[in-house]
Image: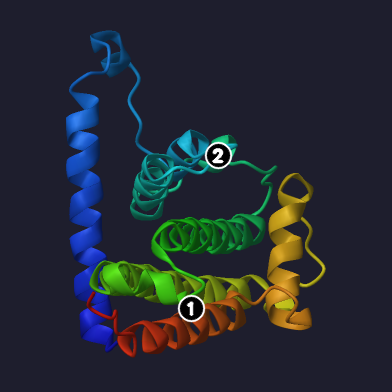
Amino acid sequence: MTCNKQKTSLYSINAIILLFFFIFTLFLPANLDSYVIMYKEQYYRLFHVHYNQYPDDTLENIFWLEQALKANFANPLYALARIETREQYEKYCYLFMMHLNLKMVEQYIFLANKFNKRYAYFFNAPWRDENLRSLDIAETYFEIARYYWTEAVSWAEKARERRFRFMRLEQVQFWEDSAFRIVEQGTLNYGRTLDRELARLNSVREQLQAMEWPEN
């Protein structure tokens, strides 16, 4: 998939998500309007992990994370970590952006796996075309996840610059650990995961394309 096609797919999916939540908000109680959500930290608090990750749950999380990515940071007084210097705040911003993008990667992988088909059995032949369309959707979501992974790596590298190496933000230590695992260790690598999933998807696609169902 080319970069332009990837961006077009991303815009289309975001439009679907926005439409979904426009309809959803029509049914919210009116008194919720008194709470104004403006900043990254506020939107991030609306993101939550569901025990069962249904497509609607994943779309909801993607929506809130997208809003968080686009919103401004709150005043450092309201940051999710204790901030005392400009340098700490700069690192905090880099880590936060990395974390938001990582969460987007995870959510799009969840969404892709709702459409992914991991095996092609001979008895799938009558529904070959439907399965192929499902694989196309899964592939699109995996490629969007790759876009956010690239963004996450970029922010992690900024957060791991030499001037920040001995600076610790204890309240977001998990974010610190993620940046370390991405940049130094390489043990957190969604790029490798996506390569593996897409290779398997293409293998299943080829098997489905080769199928023929005998006529009775």
Q: CA distance from mark 2 to mark 1?
A: 27 Å
Compared to residue 134, the image places residue 191 above or below, namely below
Dividing the picture into quarters, in which one does residue 117 lie?
bottom left
Q: Which residue is mark 2?
A: 52
Is residue 133 something that shows in the picture?
Answer: yes
Q: Which residue is mark 1?
A: 150
> In front: 65, or 52?
52
Question: Does residue 158 appear to the left or right of 67 in the view shown?
Answer: right
Residue shown at 24%/37% (left/top)?
A: 21
Residue shown at 38%/76% (left/top)?
A: 143
> In front: 86, or 125?
125
**Secondary structure under the numbered disc 2 in the rendered image:** loop
Compared to residue 164, the image places residue 104 above or below, namely above
Measured as percent of width and height from the top left, residue 174 is found at 74, 54
Is residue 164 something that shows in the picture?
Answer: no
**Mark positioned earlier in the residue sequence (2 or 1):** 2
Query: Closer to us: mark 2 or mark 1?
Result: 2
Q: Quadrant of the C terminus?
A: bottom left
Question: Does residue 172 appear to the left or right of 125 in the view shown?
Answer: right
Compared to residue 101, the image places residue 206 above or below, namely below
Dividing the picture into quarters, in which one does residue 133 lie?
bottom left
Label 1 neighbourhood size at 10 Å, few (<14), some (14-19), many (20+)? some
Q: Amino acid at mark 1?
A: Thr
Measured as percent of width and height from the top left, residue 151 is found at 47, 73
